[in-house]
Amino acid sequence: MNQRSSNLLDEALGLDQTIEPWPLRGRAVVIEDRVETSGSFVLHHLLKRSLSPNSSNVSIFIAFAQPFSHYDRILRKLGCNLVLQRDNSRFFFFDMLMLQCPGGHEGITPEGGLIALYGKIHKTILALPEVSRKNVSIIIDDLSLMEVAVNGSSDYVLDFLHYCRTLTSEFDCSLITLNHEDIYSSADRPTFLLQMEYLADILIKAEPLATGLATDVHGQLTVLSKSMNYGQESSRNNTSNFHFKVKENIVECFYPGSRG
Amino acid sequence: MAESICRLLRDGALEGEHAPALTIKDSIASPFGFHVFAHVLSQLSSFILAGKSQSRGLVVVCFSRSPSFYLELLKNKGIDVVSSDKRIQTLDCYSDPLGWKSRLTETGNFMACSHETSISRTTNVFKDVKHMDKLYNSIVELGKGLVGGGKIRFSVAIDSVDEMLRHASMSSVSGLLSKLRSHDQVSSIFWLLHSDLHEAKVTAVLEYLSSMVAGLEPLHQPANGQRGDMENFSLIEHNLKKGKFHVRFKRRNGRVRVMVQFSLQLSEKERIDKANVVLPFEHQGNGKPIQIYDGRRSLADSKHERPVGATETVQTSEDSGRGEIIYYRDSDDEMPDSDEDPDDDLDI
């Protein structure tokens, strides 16, 4: 059951088969969640998959939300040792909790702070062995806090994400971000949210059930995967939808009505 | 309808008139705009390389995707940009649009990799997307570099007006587009816009600048108040596979022609069924005479005359000299049910 439950999300993302080369390479994955249904578990799951012993993938984690100890504790429950991965240069943790970009502070502007961060990511990738450079995942947790760190400028955040996007073209990196949908959806025109949805090659939405709260089901995941073959006969977008339940050491995913 | 658009871009501008301009607009509910852009790009490219278009070159202004993406896209369509004589150039506003890499290099915090330092014959990097004047000059310079001076024209494709609008004001962006349209060496221009990223007036301004507007809309509108509903998911899933494609043409005589097509993609069965439809004037008949009323004579008169036939199979030596309707397609590019209006060039 556990093997099957994790495979629904893996299946939707193409992670159920081989993970070398990394199936998400060159793609931008945007996770959208809400207050009622946190999508952090998807982020953790993708981090765990990217650091699988069977792959040579490297993860660069940009943390605006939590300290290293938080992720270390969660990933240990999922069977992944982040300290070991960090020591083996497969996991790079950029602690951005203390990033402050007030205007004029020591000459560091909001834009300047993100420019420096981009430079640091680029430098980290270039320093990797050739074989690892093609299997890098850049993970950002999360975009709303990044926006706070740059004094609320969504334009700077979008500029930074664009430059991260260029890394997916140059190095075939995957870019994985978490965004809180309900922060932006209430606006008259949720431009930032839409910009992210346009940027995404794969959009994963964690939403509550229409029927409300339930003990056996915590929410539903919708995975929208855009075709990359523009103009080809085989060009098709793929969608999938299933329910999930977050447990202590694992997340169960199942189709609606399949739980007895 | 897509063929109509491509033909108009191919035919280009008339002397003394602005170049035809196409806005392709979509929204997140029906995100097929880039598919249409890619299709138009590849069609126009093949026309240019085959020498069948007014323009002799194409400048692709890349904001949302890398130049190498477009080279690969065209290559997959059988258009080898690199080996053909230089007819297509890309202006790279994607790799370093704000000059961040240059700034990091100046402070010693950036080292370009070999991928970035390799200079392509077909691309030029632009690092100042906030300045529309500089962008305009770069586009024109690139275009003239392709076709030379004089009266030879080039076309322009812009893959994201949204990115331009993020970096510059509406007035400066519309100014750039307007100047390109009125440049005497620009044959045609087209761009992609996500309408839901902007206020309605922004979309309206761009549509006013356009002689053609191709819009993509969902077949079914999901109800916003029902997020998380399975029925809503079905609608979203359906809308990601099919949509409504409508095109508005502004004719030179001031009239507007609107065309609507449902379903952007045909299934295999639909394609076969479509190919099996025999159209009027291509009818081979079944050997029997085909009676076609041509409107010049009364039906009573026509009854006493041999009916006109329209096919090779009914034509015999006895029939030579009698009225016939033989339909020849305009070009091999024209699909059997082409929607081209043969009277489109009338200027009444």
Image: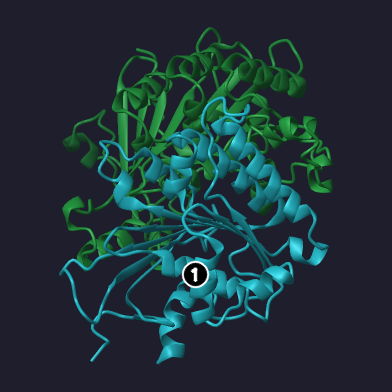
Chain colours: A cyan, B green
Image x and y of residue B117, in percent: 83, 40
Image x and y of residue B341, in percent: 39, 31
Residue B326 in view in this figure: no
Residue A156 in view in this figure: yes
Residue at image x 52%, y 75%?
A75
Residue at image x 35%, y 66%?
A222
Identify the chain of the residue marked 1, using the numbered disc in the image: A
Q: How many marks?
A: 1
Q: Quadrant of residue B145?
A: top right
- Dot 1 corresponds to which residue? A44
Nearer-the-camera pick, B43 or A258: A258
Image x and y of residue A118, in percent: 65, 44
Nearer-the-camera pick, B201 or B180: B201
Nearer-the-camera pick, B48 or A64: A64
Tag 1, which secondary structure? helix
Residue at image x 24%, y 82%?
A216
Amino acid identity at mark 1: His
Residue at image x 26%, y 63%?
A36
Q: Quadrant of residue B179?
A: top right
